[in-house]
Image (cartoon, helix red, strand yellow):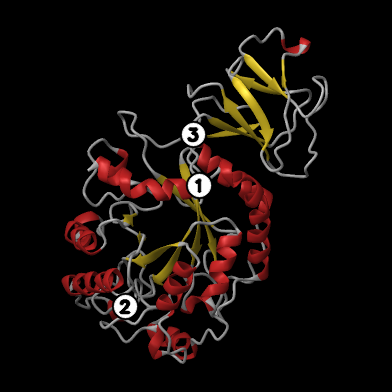
Amino acid sequence: MQEERNRRLKWFQDARFGMFIHWGLYSIPGRGEWVRSYEEIGEEEYRQYFDEWDPVRYDPREWAALAKEAGMKYAVLTTKHHDGFCLFDSRYTDYKSVNTPCRRDLVREYVDAFREAGLKVGFYYSLLDWHHPDYPAYGDPHHPERNNPEWKGKEHDFDKYLSYMHRQVEELMTNYGKIDIIWFDFSYEGHMGEDWKASELVKMIRRHQPDILINGRLEGSGETYGSIMTDTPGMFSGDFTCPEMIIPPYGLKTPSGADVPWEACFTMNNSWAYTPNDRFYKTPDMLIRKLVECVSKNGNMILNVGPTAKGEIPPEQVHILKEIGRWMRENSDSIYGCGMSSLPKPDWGRYTQNGNRIYAHVMDKCIGPVVLKGLKGRIKKARRLWDGFEMPVLDPWIGREYPDCGFINFGKEEACTLDVDGSPDTVIEIELQNDRS
C-alpha cells in the first residue's frame, strides 16, 4: 500500500507547485464562496445567480498559460462547491452550467486546455451540497437553512444524497479522460469517513482512475488530518493531507518517523472566490518565500486564483503569478524534484535539496560570507543558480573558530553578501563532493 502511494505521488512531489481555482455562482455577489451559508441566503434568492451565469470571457487556455508562466505544474478546479452548482454536464442534476445562459461544460474546456498545456489536471468536489433536497439542512452547522424554522422537521434521505454524490464523482472519473487529482472538501462532525461511504467511494475511484491522487478530506478537514498521520492509515485517509492557510512548523511525520505527503493551500488575498473588495494581497516576494518554505519541509504549495463572474483572473492575481514566474524561470531547479535537506535550517534562509545538490536560499543577506554549517570540506563547487556565477568557496581568517563550517561569498572573503540581483531569495546551487547528506 505504501509503495503504491509513493509511486502515485512521484510526479506530485517533483512538481511542488500548483494552481487552485475557486469559481462558481458565488463569483457574482463577490462576497466569497461561503456567501450562502454566512448570510443564510435561501434557495430562491440565490437562484438569481444561476439565471444570469454567463462567463463570456472564460478562456481556460489563458488560465493554463498563466499557470505555466508562473511555474505551476498542475491545477485543481472547483467542479462543484458547497452550493451544489456544477460546472460540468452532470446527468444527475439540472443545477449545472449547461442549463444557464452559459450553455457550456466548463470543466470539459478546462481539462482540454490544461492538458494541452502539459499540466496535470485536478478536480475539487465538495462533499457538502446545500442545493440537494436530501442533504441535511436544519441544525446542520453549515447549511444556509440551519436556522430556518420552516425547515425544522423536514425529512432527508441521506442515502439518496450519497448515491447522487457517488454517481457524480463517477461521472468526473469516467467522462474526462485521465484525471490526476481528486480534491474532496470536507469532513466534519457527523459527516466523516464512512458517513460518506468512503471505502466504497475510494474503491470506485481507484477502479476508474488507478493512478489518481486523493486528498485526505474524506476523513479530515483543514483542522485535522485524520489517520494519514498514523502508522496505520485507513483506505480513505488519502495520498496526501492538505493544511489550509498554514505551513506546518516542521515536516509532517507519523509516530514511527515516516514522511507524510502534504500540500499547503493558500489564497493570494484573504478570499478563495472572487472578492473585489478584499485588497489585502500578499506580495510576490512573500509567496516565493512561502513556496520555498513548503519545499524545505517536504511539502507542496497550491496557490489559489478567484476568477470573476465573467471568467477572467483579476489583474492583481495575474501580476503576482507573473512575478513568481520570473523568479521560477531562473530558480525552479531549487523547487522541482527537491525536498527537505538533512542540514539544519540556516539563520539566513532555507535549504532545499535534490540528491547531492543543495540549494541555499539566501533571504536574509549576510555580513561577510554565507556560513554553511556542517559543510566544511564537502563542497565541490557553488554557483548562483540564476546565472551560473561562481561563488568562491572560502577558508577565511574570520571563520577559523568554526571548523565545521563551509563559507562562500560573492567576492573576497570580507565582503558583505549583498542583494546584487534584486531577488527576494538568491539561490546558490551547492554541489557536494559525494552524496552524503
Q: Residues within 10 Å of mark 2 (few under 14, many from 20)?
A: few
Question: Which amino acid does the dot numbered 2 rest on?
Answer: Pro
Q: Is residue 227 shown above or below 20?
A: above
Indicate which disc, 2 or 1, sits on the residue closer to the N terminus: 2
Q: Give the CA distance from mark 3 to mark 2.
A: 53 Å
Q: Earlier in the sequence, mark 3 or mark 2?
A: 2
**Residue drawn at x 22%, y 62% as measured from the top left:** 196
Q: Which mark is residue 149?
A: 2
Using a 10 Å C-alpha cutoff, classify the residue at mark 3 as few (fewer than 14 neighbours), some (14 to 19) or many (20 or more). Answer: many
Query: Which residue is denoted by mark 1 in the rendering?
Result: 246
What x and y, as percent, mark residue 185?
36, 61
Residue at 82%, 22% in the rendered image: 412
Quadrant the N terminus occupies: top left
Q: Is residue 82 left or right of residue 327?
A: left
Q: Which residue is mark 3?
A: 340
- Residue 370, image quadrant: top right
